[in-house]
Image (cartoon, rainbow, N blue to C red):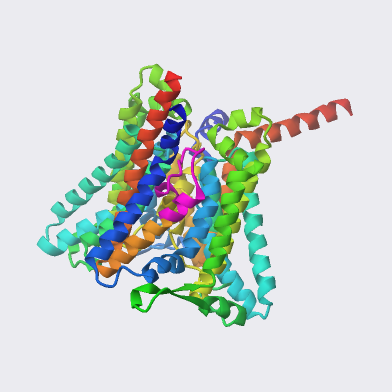
Amino acid sequence: MKYNINKLSQKQAFWPAVIFLAILLFNLIVTQGVFFRLSIVDGHLYGSLIDIFRNGSKLMLLAAGMTMVLATGGTDISVGSVMAISGAIACSIVKAVDNVALAIVSAILAGLICGFWNGFLVAKIKIQPIVATMILLVAGRGIAQLITSGKIVTVTSDAYYFINGGYILGLPFPLFIVIFLVGLLVLFVGQTAFGLFLEAVGINPRASKFAGIKVDHMLLVIYTISGTFAAVAGLIESSGIKGADCNNAGLNIEMDAILAVAIGGTNLMGGRFSIPASVAGALIVQSITTTVLTQGVPAAYIRVLKAILIVVICLSQAPAFKEKLAAKRAAKSRKAVNG
Amino acid sequence: MEKKRKFHIKNISLLITVILFVLMFVFGSVKYNSFLSISTFLNLFNDNAYLMIAGIGVTFVLITGGIDISIASTIAFTGVFSAYLLERGVPSGFAILIVLSLGVLLGSAQGALIYYFRMQPFIVTLAGQFLMRGLCVVISEESIPIRNEFFKTFALEKIVIQLGESKALTGKIYLYVFIFIAVLAVAVYVLKNTRFGRAVYALGGNETSAALMGLNVARIKISVYAISSFCAALSGIVFSFYTLAGFGLQNMGLEMDAISSAVIGGTLLSGGVGTVVGTTVGAMIQGIIQTIVTYQNLNTWWTKVTIAALLCFFIVIQRIIAIRAEKLKGRA
């Protein structure tokens, strides 16, 4: 039994998952159980816990895509804008021809193209990832505005609302989207050599290239996946607000996604990564937000809290910091031996 | 001959930018009636002085090969905090001093984290961005008006320039634009004529060689981030002259505008190449795009799309230049 726990705790997703449970436990104690109260209305589950999963679904999707991007040592700051584009396209189509399937397909296709564009700039033209994705970050919201001609497009379609508000077996539908897409991704990365290659590219792209890995192709695939997932997140978002708000859809969410991946323990400089850990990280970010809001703390403190979190996590990952800490410990133990 | 070619590689980006600016100005003048005037030109500075100051600051960081995405939040924070201090009756000079020193402090802290712990500049300044934006709202969720006399003087006083009788030959320039001119002059001098300036370029060229040459990498790195945040704080003050209010949600995304100004002005994001004059021209181009979009009565989002297209164009040009430079090096 003990052996099993040891083995489990070595998994990258272990500690983020523990922290997530700890935050939930904290809420349980502080709110004396109100937080966990689940009520069943019309056969659907309601409650704060369900809200975390529903509202966190976008972040979980983005974090999963972002994990792979960050694992290559890159970054994708355009995901928020891609969400805006996807929402704008989907809502415009639903409004014009009332065809939800066509809307979903077009939106996802748009995300795919956006991601491919990012990947093309990074892999083929060899532009630094942050700069390459900055182009779409700046242009994306403009493009979305041009699609909706500057208006907030509202839709009235029960089928479209289902994407965010629907239930299957009493659980919110977005959760199933996450389980399906992230599960597919984890299978793809875990069961093929892709994950191994990905880690290699993150640690040393040059050496990987010499070892025969097609780095260009991998980058292209990874950025395309990130864009596609962002488009799905955009669909969930626009379904949630029942319309496309190009100015605010997914605003600053790229920062939350990066934070989620960092909390999950993926090295932001590339290399070691874990998609489940990032998903747990996304749940942590979402549960912190929900906790802070239900505790009546002004929402403003969330940003400050996140800033401190990022610094602490990255500091603990920084090799220079680890070396300094190790040197200090060594000095201490030497002292203990001598003394 | 060899020298001439070097000149080309370094300046071709800036040259394209300047030509583009002139072309746009000519285009506007031909297309719209009242476009060609001194006031159109001077308004580029009146309306974008704060962006130019922030851009000059971030250029220092970009030349070393780093990035600073915290500046927009620092600008907003400066605006809110100085408005808050003035509301509490703190003398204006003292309030300005406090926010400027806070800027330097933030920048130095970011630089120290980046240098001593080898953390990625992107992540560190991302945290800085969250922190400053969060602090804004902690201080006040609403817009705070500024009624201070000193600020009002700077906001409203202007110099009227009249070169002739006709309307096209008159324009006005606000006092705060002179702050930008001073910053530009100091930045040009520092980068061109001081040891520190040369060290900044050396660091961007190759950090390891710079360290082996005996340059104090720690000091330079921390300084450039301090300069960037200081300029952002100064830009925040100029921005509060411009709007006479402090509001925590102001200038969302301005960091990208500042960085794109630098890129359009010929700064290489991989480090080592860039000028603050170029950044100024880059900001002027953004200003003129905005003006043309307004004249054309288009959706303001066209500005963003055009700027992004320009950005893309310049980044690709940069790549071509870099590849050519590598080839030249290989031949030598």
Residue A231, image x, y percentages? 28, 50
Q: Could you say which is closer to the camera, residue B27 or residue A61?
A: B27
Q: How many marks?
A: 0
- Residue B23 at least partly seen: yes
Give the vertical position of B121 relative to A270 (above or below). below
Q: Could you say which is closer to the camera, residue A37 or residue A200?
A: A200
**Point 64% across, 46% down: residue:** B222
Judge left or right: residue A90 versus residue A34. Answer: left
The magenta stretch spans residue B295: no
Residue at the far front: name it.
B164
Residue at the far right: name it.
A339
Residue A197, image x, y percentages? 39, 25
**Point 42% across, 29% down: residue:** B325
Q: Quadrant of the N terminus of chain B?
A: top left
Residue at the far top: name it.
A211
- Residue A238 at least partly seen: no
Please identify the quarter of the rendering in which residue A240 is found.
bottom left
Judge left or right: residue B178 versus residue A247. Answer: right
Judge left or right: residue A77 versus residue B277. Answer: left
Please identify the quarter of the rendering in which residue A30 is found.
bottom right
Please identify the quarter of the rendering in which residue B256 is found.
bottom left
Residue B320, image x, y percentages? 35, 34
Q: Could you say which is closer to the camera, residue A131 or residue B116?
A: A131
Span colored in magenta: B262-282
**Point 54% across, 31% down: residue:** A1
**Point 18% across, 50% down: residue:** A106
